[in-house]
Image: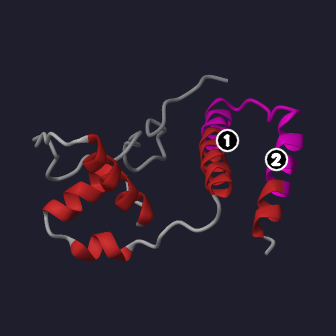
Amino acid sequence: MATETPGTHALCKKEATMGRPRKSEPRDRQLNLSLTDSELDGIRRRAEAVGMRPVHFGRAILLDEERAVTRQAAPTGSNLERLIYGQLVRLGNNLNQLVRYLHRTGDPVPADLEPLLNDIRQIIARSMQP
Protein backbone atom coordinates (compact mmCIF):
# COMPACT_ATOMS: atom_id res chain seq x y z
CA MET A 1 0.00 0.00 0.00
CA ALA A 2 1.43 3.36 -0.98
CA THR A 3 1.71 5.82 1.85
CA GLU A 4 0.22 9.25 1.48
CA THR A 5 1.23 12.32 3.33
CA PRO A 6 -1.45 13.81 5.60
CA GLY A 7 -3.76 16.22 3.83
CA THR A 8 -3.01 15.07 0.27
CA HIS A 9 -5.88 12.58 -0.04
CA ALA A 10 -8.62 13.64 -2.43
CA LEU A 11 -11.19 13.68 0.38
CA CYS A 12 -9.16 16.01 2.61
CA LYS A 13 -10.62 19.48 2.62
CA LYS A 14 -7.55 21.26 3.94
CA GLU A 15 -3.86 20.58 4.16
CA ALA A 16 -2.84 19.02 7.48
CA THR A 17 -0.09 20.74 9.40
CA MET A 18 2.26 19.18 11.87
CA GLY A 19 3.38 20.81 15.09
CA ARG A 20 2.01 23.85 16.80
CA PRO A 21 0.13 26.46 14.79
CA ARG A 22 1.99 29.68 14.13
CA LYS A 23 1.20 32.55 16.44
CA SER A 24 -0.20 35.71 14.94
CA GLU A 25 2.40 37.72 16.84
CA PRO A 26 5.51 35.58 17.35
CA ARG A 27 7.80 36.23 20.30
CA ASP A 28 11.01 36.99 18.47
CA ARG A 29 12.55 39.56 20.83
CA GLN A 30 14.59 38.84 23.95
CA LEU A 31 15.19 40.55 27.25
CA ASN A 32 18.24 39.19 29.03
CA LEU A 33 18.60 39.64 32.78
CA SER A 34 21.55 39.03 35.04
CA LEU A 35 20.58 37.40 38.31
CA THR A 36 22.39 36.02 41.31
CA ASP A 37 22.07 32.33 42.13
CA SER A 38 19.72 33.12 45.01
CA GLU A 39 17.52 35.37 42.85
CA LEU A 40 17.23 32.70 40.15
CA ASP A 41 16.49 30.02 42.76
CA GLY A 42 13.75 32.24 44.21
CA ILE A 43 12.17 32.71 40.79
CA ARG A 44 12.30 28.98 40.12
CA ARG A 45 10.64 28.20 43.47
CA ARG A 46 7.89 30.78 42.92
CA ALA A 47 7.26 29.50 39.38
CA GLU A 48 7.10 25.89 40.56
CA ALA A 49 4.69 26.87 43.35
CA VAL A 50 2.14 28.05 40.77
CA GLY A 51 2.88 25.28 38.25
CA MET A 52 4.70 27.39 35.68
CA ARG A 53 8.07 27.31 33.97
CA PRO A 54 10.38 30.12 35.14
CA VAL A 55 10.37 31.82 31.74
CA HIS A 56 6.56 31.94 31.61
CA PHE A 57 6.37 33.05 35.23
CA GLY A 58 8.87 35.85 34.61
CA ARG A 59 7.00 37.05 31.52
CA ALA A 60 3.70 37.09 33.41
CA ILE A 61 5.22 39.08 36.27
CA LEU A 62 6.99 41.55 33.99
CA LEU A 63 3.88 42.12 31.92
CA ASP A 64 1.81 42.50 35.10
CA GLU A 65 -0.38 39.53 34.33
CA GLU A 66 -1.10 38.77 37.96
CA ARG A 67 -4.19 36.75 37.03
CA ALA A 68 -2.08 34.41 34.91
CA VAL A 69 0.26 33.77 37.82
CA THR A 70 -2.41 33.11 40.44
CA ARG A 71 -4.87 31.40 38.12
CA GLN A 72 -2.93 28.15 37.86
CA ALA A 73 -3.32 25.68 40.66
CA ALA A 74 -0.25 24.70 42.59
CA PRO A 75 0.91 21.19 41.77
CA THR A 76 -0.38 18.59 44.18
CA GLY A 77 1.12 15.35 45.34
CA SER A 78 4.59 14.27 46.18
CA ASN A 79 7.62 14.83 44.02
CA LEU A 80 7.51 11.15 43.05
CA GLU A 81 3.89 11.48 41.89
CA ARG A 82 4.80 14.51 39.76
CA LEU A 83 7.71 12.60 38.22
CA ILE A 84 5.46 9.63 37.43
CA TYR A 85 2.86 11.96 35.92
CA GLY A 86 5.53 13.62 33.75
CA GLN A 87 6.72 10.24 32.51
CA LEU A 88 3.14 9.17 31.74
CA VAL A 89 2.66 12.36 29.72
CA ARG A 90 5.81 11.59 27.70
CA LEU A 91 4.73 7.98 27.25
CA GLY A 92 1.29 9.10 26.06
CA ASN A 93 2.93 11.40 23.54
CA ASN A 94 5.07 8.55 22.21
CA LEU A 95 2.06 6.22 21.99
CA ASN A 96 0.13 8.90 20.10
CA GLN A 97 2.98 9.21 17.59
CA LEU A 98 3.08 5.43 17.19
CA VAL A 99 -0.66 5.19 16.55
CA ARG A 100 -0.53 8.04 14.04
CA TYR A 101 2.29 6.25 12.24
CA LEU A 102 0.39 2.95 12.22
CA HIS A 103 -2.72 4.64 10.84
CA ARG A 104 -0.71 6.43 8.18
CA THR A 105 1.16 3.32 7.01
CA GLY A 106 -1.58 0.75 7.59
CA ASP A 107 0.83 -1.45 9.56
CA PRO A 108 -0.69 -3.79 12.17
CA VAL A 109 -0.49 -2.99 15.88
CA PRO A 110 2.59 -4.67 17.40
CA ALA A 111 1.74 -7.72 19.54
CA ASP A 112 3.80 -6.47 22.49
CA LEU A 113 1.84 -3.20 22.70
CA GLU A 114 -1.15 -4.61 24.60
CA PRO A 115 0.86 -5.73 27.68
CA LEU A 116 2.44 -2.27 27.79
CA LEU A 117 -0.98 -0.63 27.63
CA ASN A 118 -2.20 -2.88 30.47
CA ASP A 119 0.76 -1.79 32.61
CA ILE A 120 -0.03 1.86 31.90
CA ARG A 121 -3.69 1.32 32.78
CA GLN A 122 -2.67 -0.25 36.10
CA ILE A 123 -0.37 2.66 36.94
CA ILE A 124 -3.11 5.16 36.17
CA ALA A 125 -5.67 3.18 38.20
CA ARG A 126 -3.31 3.09 41.20
CA SER A 127 -2.66 6.82 40.94
CA MET A 128 -6.43 7.52 40.98
CA GLN A 129 -6.92 5.69 44.29
CA PRO A 130 -6.91 7.88 47.42
**Residue 104 drawn above or below residue 81:** above
Task: Give coordinates of residue 120: x percent, y percent.
Answer: 79, 50
Crowding near the residue tagged with mark 2, few <14, some 14–19, many ≥20 C-alpha atoms within 10 Å: few
Q: Nearer the viewer, residue 64 or 44?
A: 44
What is the image's colouring?
A: secondary structure
* Image coordinates for residue 73, horizontal then vertical, percent: 46, 73
- Which of the numbered marks, if any, corresponds to residue 95? 1
* Residue 106 image offset from top left, x and y in percent: 70, 32
Q: Which residue is mark 2?
A: 117
Q: In the picture provided, is 19 more to the left or to the right than 65?
A: right
Instruction: Say above or below: 16 vs 71.
Output: above
Foreground: 35 or 123? Answer: 35
Q: Which residues are magenta?
A: 96-122
Looking at the image, which is closer to me, 109 or 97? Answer: 97
Q: Quadrant of residue 112?
A: top right
Dot 1: element: helix
Which amino acid type corresponds to the residue marked 2 in the rendered image? Answer: Leu
The magenta stretch spans residue 112: yes
Residue drawn at x 37%, y 42% as measured from the top left = 15
Badge 2 vs badge 1, beta-carbon distance below 8 Å: yes
- Local packing at callout 1 (Cα closer than 10 Å; few below 14, some 14-19, many 20+) is some
